Image (cartoon, helix red, strand yellow):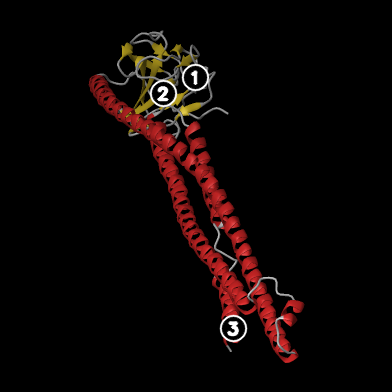
Amino acid sequence: MRKTIMRIVSMVSLTALLFAFPIHTERVSAKSLNEMRDELSQLQEQEKEIQSKLDSLGDSIEDQQIEVKQLYKKVSNLEAQIDAYKTQIDAIDKQIAEQNARISTLNTEIAAKETKMEEIMAKLKKRVKAITQTNQYSSFQLLMNTEDYADYLLKAQVISCVSEHDKALRDEAEAEKQAIELKKAAVEQEKAESEAAKAELQTLKGGLDTQYETLDALYITAKNKENKLLQQQNSYENKLQQLQASEDELDREIAAYLNGTPAASTYGGKMYWPAPTIKRISSGYGKRGSGWHRAIDISNGRSLGEPIVAAASGTVIKVQSMHYSYGNFCMIDHGLDANGVRIVTLYAHMRYTPSVKVGQYVVGGLTQIGVIGNTGESYGAHLHFEVREDNVRVDPIAKGYVVQPK
C-alpha cells in the first residue's frame, strides 16, 4: 500500500512538473518593431517633403516666413519621431524586464526540482539496502541465507517488487530530468531572444540620441531664423513707412502741379509697351507682402541697361535723381482723356538720370527716356511703371492702358 501511494505521488509530481512550466513563453513582439519602423519611415518621408519645401524657398520676407513655419514643422516632425522611438523602447524595456523575471523564477524552480530528484534517489537506495542489507545481493546469496524454499520465494518476490519499483522511480526521475532539460532549453532560447531585443534596443537608443542632437540644432536654427525674420520685418516695416512718407510727399507735389497747371494736350487713347525689348512682368499690380504694389514691374532677369520709351505722347513734368524710393525716375503728363481724367505715367529705378528734361515733349513709343536700372528701393534691375488717373495709381493692364506683348 505504501509503495502504491509513493508511485502515485511520483506520477503526480512528474505531471505537475510538465504542466507547471509551459514550454511556450511570451516573446518580444517582432510586429511592434516592424510597426515602429513603418511609423518612423512615414515620419522620415514627411521630413523629406518639408526639407524639399525649405530648399525651394527664396530670400523674400514671405519666403522667410514660410521657411520659419516649415522649420518649426520639421521640429514637430522630429519630436514625433523621438516619441515613436521612446514608446517602442519603453515597451521593449518592459518585455525584457518581464522575461528576466520569468527566467529567474524558472531557474529557481528547476533547481528545486533537481534537489527533489536527488532526495528521491537517496531514499530509494536506503529502502533497497534495508531490504537486502547489501547493494549487490544475488539470487544465490539469497538462497544460501534462507532456511527453506518458501522463505526464498518470499524474499525473491520482495526483491523483484523492489526492483520494479526502483525501475519505475528511475524512469520517473529520468522523465523529470528530460522535462527539466526541455525547460532549460526554452529558458536559454528566451535568454537569446532577450539579448537580441537588447541589441535592437541599443540601436534604437543610438538613433534616439542622434535625433535629440538633430532636434536641438534644428530648434536653434529655427529660433535664429525667427529672430532674424522679426528684425527684418521690423526693418521692413520701417522702410515701408519711409517709402510711404516719400510717396505721399511726391503725390502732394504732383497734385499741386496738376491743380496749378492746365493740361497741355489731350490723351490720345493709346499707350505703347514702355520696355520694347522686355516682355515679362516680374511683379504685377496688387497685394505684395504686407503692402500693395500700385504698378507693374517689367524685367526678365537680364534687363539692366535695356531702353525705356514714353508709353504715350505728352510732356515731361518731373525728372529726379536718386529718390529714396523711386531712384532715378521721370513722369509724363499725357493730358485729359475723353472723360476729362488727367493721365500721367511714371517710370522708376532707371540706371542713370533720365535722358529727358522737364517741359520736353515726347512721342509715345518712339522717344527713349532712359534705360532700366536698379536704383532706389529696388532689388534687381527692372522698370517700375505706373499709370495715374487724376494722380490715383491704377492697374495699367486691368484698365487697358497697355497690353503685355507675347
Residue corresponding to mark 3? 8
Binning the other alpha carbons within 10 Å of mark 3 as few (below 14), some (14 to 19) or many (20 upward) gives: few
Residue 404 drawn at (x, y percent): 51, 29
Residue 194 drawn at (x, y percent): 54, 53
Residue 339, above or below 36: above
The quarter of the picture where the C terminus appears is top right
Q: For this view, does 249 lie left or right of residue 125?
A: left
Specify the label residue 267 is tagged with: none
Specify the label residue 385 is tagged with: 2
The residue sitting at 67% across, 85% down in the picture is: 158
Q: Quadrant of residue 1?
A: bottom right
The residue sitting at 46% across, 25% down in the picture is: 271
Residue 156, above or below 304: below
Q: Which of 202/258 is in front?
A: 202
Circles 3 and 1 in contact, beta carbons < 8 Å: no
Mark sitting earlier along the chain (3/1): 3
* Secondary structure of the residue carrying numbered label 2: strand
Q: Between tags 2 and 3, which lies in front?
A: 3
| Number of marks present in the image shown | 3
Specify the label residue 275 is tagged with: 1
Q: Quadrant of residue 229?
A: top left
The residue sitting at 53% across, 39% down in the picture is: 48
Circles 2 and 1 in contact, beta carbons < 8 Å: yes
The answer to whether one can see residue 293 in this image is no
In space, the residues marked 2 and 3 are separated at their CA atoms by: 110 Å
